[in-house]
Amino acid sequence: MITFAAMNILGDPLFNILGPVAGDVDNPESVKIIEEAKEQYYLDKSLPERYVRWAGDFVTGDFGVRFSATGQPPVTNLIKERFPRTLQLMIMAQLIAVGLAIPWAVTAASRANSKTDKTSTVTAFAFVSLPNFALAVILFYVFSIRLDWMPDVYTATDPFWGFTHDHRLIQTLLPALTLGLGGAAAYQRLLRTDLITTLQEDFILMARSKGVSRRKVLYKHALRPSLFSLITVLAINISYMIGGALVVETFFRIPGLGTAVVEAVLREDFPVVLAIVMIVAAAFMVFNYLADLLYGVIDPRVRSQEKESESSFNRLWKAQKNLEVDEKVNIQTIEASS
């Protein structure tokens, strides 16, 4: 709602659609074009009514049409074209981040306060504090220009699966690494702290006293109950990933949602910006809901606590109903005796 209001109040949608024609009110043909544009984009309605109409269309899958005086291509076509590329980038970046963070955190937590842990901490803080655009420049210069290990051009028409420069899997690897390294450092710091706390629990001491191997203690007994905070941050981090995609996709010339937002903002193409903002917001809610479901998968105690709280609520509700019935019976008995 805030984005919709800002886009319509701070800019002139009619001018963005028609250009100079929007101000040519003395020309009958221009006036006709202006009236048709107002009707098509609901610009002849009040701002609240325009928002309700736009939100209703969005829920049904109609994202509107792009601001253009010729053709008015649907926003849905742009989303269908750009979204898969951004999704591939996000998935690869998260896989890289989690794949690096877990062994990195386990190694640091198992050697807490050692030189290895302190070196790990400094490295993590360096990656967290390094902006995406700076990391993109460094990685591109090293791996694409100097070493020539990675392709320097992204070609959307190339096949995805493959391990040469002519496949999008390899072309997306460097941008995904740029996004994933910062996330890996943040995940590592969080998971390391939780692992250190878990390693001091009684069940870990019991496993060690039974002669369970160090690796099994770390990865089987300690890691699983330490993942709650990491899962929460993984869900929240989707907004950070989308924000980073604006920079990374622009730098590596990947035609995804990030570059679509940049292009739409520069053209003041409001329907495109609004559609992508709504998609990001919906993805944020979905991932947070999935994170809540994963809590019960990781730790069965969460499911039992939810069942206990649900059964307690049911017991309270039934007790309240029984109390109301008893009060009615007592009132009827008193009235009958009187």
Image (cartoon, helix red, strand yellow):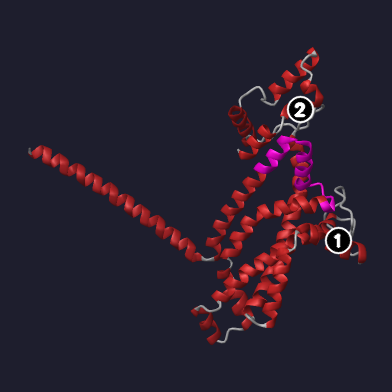
Q: Quadrant of residue 41?
A: top right
The span shown in magenta is 251-278
Please state if 156 lies on the left or on the right of 299 as rendered. right
Q: Residue at x 31, y 50 (%)?
A: 318
Element carrying mark 1: helix
Report crowding for label 2: few under 14, some 14 to 19, many 20 or more residues within 10 A (C-alpha).
some
Quadrant housing residue 26: top right
The amino acid type, in three-letter code, at marker 1 is Phe
User: How far is mark 1 from mark 2, CA to CA?
Assistant: 40 Å
Q: Which residue is mark 1?
A: 140
Q: Quadrant of the N terminus?
A: top right
Judged left or right of residue 314, residue 56 is: right
Can you give x and y, in whole percent of width and height, for residue 107 in the image? 67, 77
Label 1 CA crowd tier, 10 Å (few <14, some 14–19, many 20+): many
* Residue 189 belongs to the span the image colors magenta: no
Would residue 128 appear left or right of 304 to someone viewing this image? right
Residue 9 in the image, given as x and y percentages of width and height = 66, 32
Q: Going 12% across and 37% down the picture, which residue do you hit?
A: 335
From the image, tell me which residue sits under label 2. 15
- The tally of labels here is 2
Sequence-first tag of 1 and 2: 2
Q: Amino acid at mark 2?
A: Phe
Give the farthest residue toward the top: 28
Residue 223, quarter of the rendered image? bottom right
Observer-nearest of 312 and 113: 113
Can residue 5 be seen here? The reply is: yes
Residue toward you, 236 or 306: 236
| Contact check, label 1 and label 2, Cβ < 8 Å | no
